Amino acid sequence: MKGYKITNCAQDKRIGIVGNSLKEIFSKGCQKLKLDHLNVTMMTLDGTVIDDEDYFQQLPAQTLLIFRLNGETFETGADLIYNVLAAVNNNTLKTSIKIKSFMDENIKEKIRILSSVLDADDDNDKKKEMSSLRLRDPDWFQGLDTRARTKEEFMFKRCQERIRSYMYKTKTDVIKSDFYIKHSKCRKYLDEVFKQFSELLTKNKHHGYYFDRSNTNGLCDEIGTFKCEGAWNQSICTYERGTGHKINPYQNRESRIIFSTWNLDHWVERSRTVIPALFEASKMASEAHRSINMNYFYELLFTTVNLKLVHIVCHDKGQHNSAKCDPNLYLQYKKVMF
């Protein structure tokens, strides 16, 4: 039996509860918060919907669970950062014309300027960024609900959470779709590919090493500096004439928080492109009695074959029109029968 913390969308109260299953925690949570269970969605802080028992069981003890009523809006941690910055309206700050001008700029520009300030050389921070142990740099871990003993362990787990969220968001979007519900033959092929996804993700430890500076396959250098890879349709980050955005979340607590606003962006879009391609692949597979090319879709969803690490300024949320899946790679040659 594990303990969890629960709260509502307003996050004006936090309650501790214990339970063994998703159903038990959901039921207890609705009772404690006095919410109608028929109109509630349970989520993690990053907005991931928790409606899968396997995913729920992987959440660590004391995870904060959000109970959102249908129709309510919920702000993720990154949203809160944006809104706090956007809402600053202090009269003392406004007495300075330059500061007023800064506060009137768009929020992405504010993040950019704040990041550049954090990049400034500081001897104390330089020493701390090389420290890994929690005991050596306790300030870095301030406010974190984690048992991680090192920065690398914490960053590894944060990356795992992002990759897990792609898995469960994709699975949720698929099984709730009209296509999945209506096409029983295709459903079997989709169920099989998600089973294979789960097995390979477990084998690869959910690619947590992307954020781990001690791993040679990480996306940062040996001291933990990450560089923006540019917008989805660019080969490099063009910020500061090609110098590019960069950040070292290992350096200090502020940089760690700002790094949470960086995105692992799907070049070929997950929801608009990859999921429809999975549907098409399942239809093709059922007609040809061949298996879906799991490795192709796995790389698109969970690996740096299709994921780019980007600064918030370079994260283009518009449609990636020219980034398409290749139908020639949808199927394997292996014959299967369901």
Image: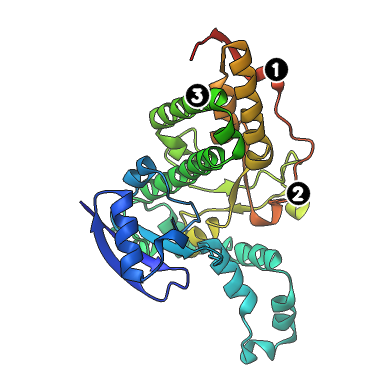
Q: Amino acid at mark 1?
A: Asn
* Residue under the point 60% across and 68% down: 82
Tell me which numbered mark, 1 or 2, is placed earlier along the sequence: 2
Q: CA distance from mark 3 to mark 1?
A: 21 Å
- Residue 222, image x, y percentages: 48, 42
Reading the image, the residue beneath label 2 is: 238
Q: CA distance from mark 1 to mark 2?
A: 33 Å
- Residue 223, image x, y percentages: 48, 46
Q: Nearer the viewer, mark 2 or mark 3?
A: 3
Residue 188: which disc?
Answer: 3
- Residue 215, image x, y percentages: 44, 36
* Residue under the point 76% across and 49% down: 238
Q: Amino acid at mark 2?
A: Thr
Label 3 Cα neighbours within 10 Å, binned few <14 / some 14-19 / many ≥20: some
Tell me which numbered mark, 3 or 1, is placed earlier along the sequence: 3
Residue 328: which disc?
Answer: 1
